[in-house]
Image (cartoon, rainbow, N blue to C red):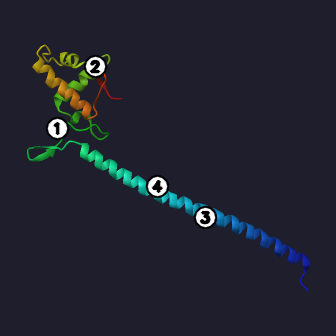
Amino acid sequence: MPDPELLERITARRAELDELEEQLAKQLAEVRAERDELAVAERVLARVSEQLADEHASAAPAPRQVGGRAVMLLPHRTPDVEETMLPPDHQRILAAVRQAAGPVMARQVGEMPGVDVTVRARLEPLRGRLVRLVDRGWLRKLPDGRFTTRL
């Protein structure tokens, strides 16, 4: 006849393994559910990224043709675009805004590089350049109409 103590140990071990199997099955189900959630999140992220890229591409102005080549005369400010890539007059405008003690009006910017701001016909093109620099992310325009550098 089998040893009763050995049978008891086998039965106890079987109960431990059954409990462990139940815990592992529960953990496996949780892991699979989380994996499914991550797969959904990845698809949503990819879809949103595509939509944002499409919106950004459609919002960006089309490059112009210069010498038969497509160029952006005033590029958007991005980490890979340096200020030296801007046209010289726009670089001077940025420098004038930076040199100011704080936010400046277009007239003050014009006085720094030596533009005759007493003539409105000279001031408006300067204001247009400032606004384009704002649109491309190089400057900020405050609600009161003054211009300042971006952080």
Q: Position of residue 126 (x, y in %)?
A: 17, 24
Q: Residues within 10 Å of mark 1 (few under 14, many from 20)?
A: few
Using the numbered discs, state the Cα–Cα distance from disc 3 to disc 4 in whole angstroms: 18 Å
Using the numbered discs, state the Cα–Cα distance from disc 1 to disc 3 in whole angstroms: 57 Å
Of 112 and 125, the residue lying toward us: 125
**Given the image, on which type of amino acid does mark 4 rest?**
Ala
Using the numbered discs, state the Cα–Cα distance from disc 2 to disc 4 in whole angstroms: 47 Å
Label 2 sits on residue: 99
Specify which label sits upstream in the sequence, 2 or 4. Answer: 4
Q: Position of residue 120 (x, y in %)?
A: 12, 17
Label pair 1/4, CB-CB below 8 angstroms: no
**Given the image, on which type of amino acid does mark 3 rest?**
Ala
Q: In the displayed image of the protein, which residue is found farthest to the bottom?
A: 1
Secondary structure at numbered mark 1: loop
**Given the image, on which type of amino acid does mark 2 rest?**
Gln
**Given the image, on which type of amino acid does mark 1 rest?**
Leu
Label pair 2/4, CB-CB below 8 angstroms: no
Secondary structure at numbered mark 4: helix
Label 4 sits on residue: 41
Q: Residues within 10 Å of mark 3 (few under 14, many from 20)?
A: few
| Residue 29 tag number | 3
Secondary structure at numbered mark 3: helix
Residue placed at 33% from the left, 50% from the top? 51
